[in-house]
Image (tube, grey):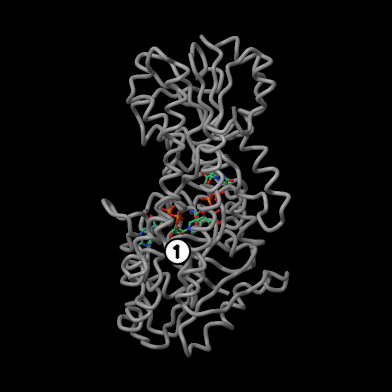
Amino acid sequence: MRLTVIGTGYLGATHAACMAELGHDVLGVDVDPDKITALQSGSVPFYEPGLAELLAKHVASGRLRFTTSYREAAEFAEVHFSCVGTPQQPGGQGADLRYVDAVIESLAPHLDRPALVVGKSTVPVGTAGRLAGRLAELAPAGAQVRLAWNPEFLREGFAIEDTLRPDRLVIGFDGGDTASEPLLREVYRPLLDAGVPLVVTDFPTAELVKTSANAFLATKISFINAMAEVCEVAGADVTQLSAALSYDDRIGGRFLHAGVGFGGGCLPKDIRAFRARAEELGVGRALAFLEEVDAINLRRRDRVMELAAELLPDGLSGRRIAVWGAAFKPDSDDIRDSPALALAGRLHRAGASVSVYDPKAMDNARKMRPELDYATGPLESAQGAELIVHLTEWRDFRDLDPRAVAEVVARPQIIDGRNVLDRDGWRAAGWTFRSLGRQ
Ligand SMILES: NC(=O)C1=CN([C@@H]2O[C@H](COP(=O)(O)OP(=O)(O)OC[C@H]3O[C@@H](n4cnc5c(N)ncnc54)[C@H](O)[C@@H]3O)[C@@H](O)[C@H]2O)C=CC1
Ligand SMILES: O=C(O)[C@H]1O[C@H](OP(=O)(O)OP(=O)(O)OC[C@H]2O[C@@H](n3ccc(=O)[nH]c3=O)[C@H](O)[C@@H]2O)[C@H](O)[C@@H](O)[C@@H]1O
């Protein structure tokens, strides 16, 4: 089939390459001409394991092309996936829908034959219904142009695997639309044949599956981080607590990893947008707990600052601190709402001289926080440091020999903000080792 994928960021570039992998002819569309030039030459402007290879493969095979032209997109395909961003509103809590709206405004006037627009962005419930109306108003083909909502559940770092082998597909259709489901079944045929469950539903349910999934995941992380706060004062160990909880299948061990908390371009903004939307709908109290989920998450960052102050009792000003990690999680160069980079900035503002190292996110970090120092490796960043703060759990950090690191620092003190380093090994090498939710 011929498809377009509009918005070629983390989600769209992955979706476009994966749809080509499923055998479709795909045209990626973006308003950013530099991004389109890069993608067309087979290079991915961000880091996602395996994506550069998959994209280059399908650009070379001719199954994947890119353009900035909406007219070309409308002429090329009958199915158009919309994958543009829905960031937090500047100065507000709700989702900024201007890009999602712009796709409809730009594409619809060119749709003069039957077409299906498929929203994949994460949106507040009610958005799809509104966009469907606008699409029918603007498209020359009128009611023959339909909308479906097909939220995306991929994780950065596992984006290809999650797209080609998702846990489930969820698709919402407008009441009375019987034409679109067969079309989307055709798009996803290889996944459906492989047994991926498909949930067919209405617009609001499809939208809510996505926002409630992210709300649940964020809640799970904040739950264990709240337990970490209690462990800290009660003398308990949150890593053992979480391991013990995980033996109960009803609880499960995934997303129960206590640490400096969640960041990224999705969980933080999605719980805020969900809460804001619930307020608009008059059910704010139902989601009031999400405010606490957010607050628990942000308090973990405060806790790292407290630990740093305890370890450097003469004050942070003028002290040399190494920050290991800048991305919001390993296997990604995404620094959006990254706890690591936020803390590097706070330590710098407190007067410390901060040297950051991240295996993949250095360019993005430098652009966002040019005031920090950047090192070429973990040992260089640790050179002369009085404290190391480990905030993104890249394998590179876990594999380091604590004795080798001890040789380059001024004082062997480390805060493990992700609870993954070998505490006993670091202590045996002479380190003062502090972590979150543990003694
Ligand atoms: N990043 C992720 O892992 C996931 C993201 N999502 C959701 O997917 C959506 C997109 O997220 P990301 O890919 O992370 O955002 P992003 O910011 O990386 O990419 C958005 C892209 O849309 C382009 N764009 C903006 N306006 C446009 C327009 N009018 N026409 C065409 N292109 C336009 C931008 O230039 C950019 O390349 C968001 O709603 C997000 O919540 C959902 C699941 C996973
Ligand atoms: O809507 C989205 O964009 C995506 O958001 C998350 O995916 P992602 O943000 O890529 O990353 P996660 O693996 O969920 O991690 C999010 C944050 O939580 C933190 N985390 C995760 C798990 C855990 O146990 N503890 C914890 O602190 C991570 O370090 C990271 O900062 C969801 O997992 C995806 O299903 C969803 O599609």
Picture coordinates of residue 274 (x, y %)? 40, 61
Above or below for 327 versus 67: above
Three-letter residue code for mark 1: Ser
Above or below for 294 versus 201: above
- In this orientation, which residue lies closer to the viewer: 3 or 195? 195
Question: Residue 71 occupies which quadrant of the picture?
Answer: bottom left
- In this orientation, which residue lies closer to the viewer: 389 or 18? 389
Question: Residue 69 occupies which quadrant of the picture?
Answer: bottom left
Which residue is drawn at the image coordinates 60% and 15% (left, top)? 431
Of the 4 image quadrants, the one containing the C terminus is top right
Kind of element beneath mark 1: loop
Picture coordinates of residue 340 (x, y %)? 46, 34
Above or below for 400 versus 77: above
- In this orientation, which residue lies closer to the viewer: 382 or 314? 314
Question: In the visual, does 216 lie left or right of 365?
Answer: right
Question: In the visual, does 61 lie left or right of 347?
Answer: right
Of the 4 image quadrants, the one containing the N terminus is bottom right
- In this orientation, which residue lies closer to the viewer: 328 or 120? 328
Above or below for 431 versus 53: above
Provide the residue designation for mark 1. 121
> Is the CB of the residue bearing disc 1 within 8 angstroms of ligand 1?
yes
Which residue is drawn at the image coordinates 46% and 53% (left, top)? 266
Which residue is drawn at the image coordinates 33% and 26% (left, top)? 371
Question: Residue 242 occupies which quadrant of the picture?
Answer: top right
